[in-house]
Amino acid sequence: MSGAGPEIHRAAGPVAPERDCPLCPRLAAFREGNRAEHPDWFNAPVPTFGALDVRLLIVGLAPGLRGANRTGRPFTGDYAGDLLYATLLSLGFAQGTYGQSRDDGLKLVDCAISNAVRCVPPQNKPLPEEITRCRSFLAATIAAMPNLVAILALGRIAHDSVVRTLGGKLSAHPFAHGRHHRLITGAHSLSLFDSYHCSRYNTNTGVLTTEMFTALFGEVRAYLDAAAPVPA
């Protein structure tokens, strides 16, 4: 893949919102309420975890109230993180020990983790306009990743936001667990892999099993192993 990011993203702005981002009044008010109730929590837009020179970007929905919103690192401190980081460790996408804390020393390998919406939404449900407003940060993050080869979307909202960010049509790229899409933007292309979100609800109801999740990440691992090598 070319070292330059997709042309559609070259005018993108900052990769992360400011701590007191005012773009979504409802989310800002919820953030202030959480700061008052839990002053020791992170309670701010959660930044991308990992380096920008990696080949894989994992995109989730939004920070969990008692997970990433509390700890300040995506998927850290809740059940979804337990499953995600165990899977990453098992397939060589992470090193160290996951301790449900952003200072546990865990390091990602050739991947980064972000969210379609950077602030925690009430009831874990961002509004469509909030997803749209936050998309500029996803676009800027993708634009800042010169070696990006693949994106793995966790859930339909993350999938839709990635497709729209890359200028694709949802009708041409429907979400389905295990599906692999090719998105062309100018002279560049990216692979998009879909997974059901690794939430406790999805695993408790059998929508997503550990075996399904591991198998999909194994496919992504094999895809990257067959693609261009990691830059020195």
Image (spheres, grey):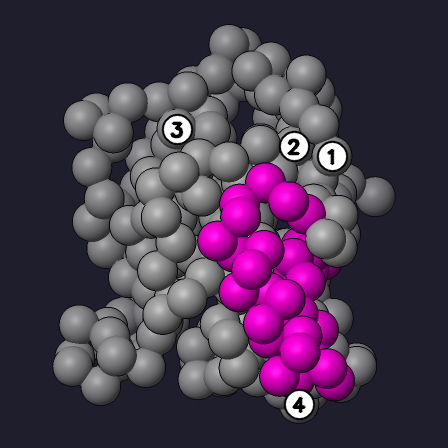
Labelled pair 1, 2 in contact (Cβ < 8 Å): yes
From what the image shows, is residue 73 above or below residue 113?
Answer: below
Q: Nearer the viewer, mark 4 or mark 2?
A: 2
Q: Is residue 55 visible?
A: no
The residue tagged with tag 2: helix, strand or loop?
helix
Q: Which residue is mark 2?
A: 140
The amino acid type of the residue labelled 2 equals Ala
The amino acid type of the residue labelled 4 equals Gly
Labelled pair 4, 2 in contact (Cβ < 8 Å): no
**Magenta residues, start to end:** 21-50
**What is the number of the mark on residue 98?**
none
Q: Earlier in the sequence, mark 1 or mark 2?
A: 1
Q: Earlier in the sequence, mark 4 or mark 2?
A: 4
The residue sitting at 53% across, 48% down in the picture is: 25
Q: Which residue is mark 1?
A: 14
The residue tagged with tag 3: helix, strand or loop?
helix
**What is the number of the mark on residue 164?**
3
The residue tagged with tag 4: helix, strand or loop?
loop
The residue sitting at 67% across, 17% down in the picture is: 10
Q: Earlier in the sequence, mark 4 or mark 1?
A: 1
Q: Residues within 10 Å of mark 4 (few under 14, many from 20)?
A: some
Viewer-proximal residue among 178 and 229: 178
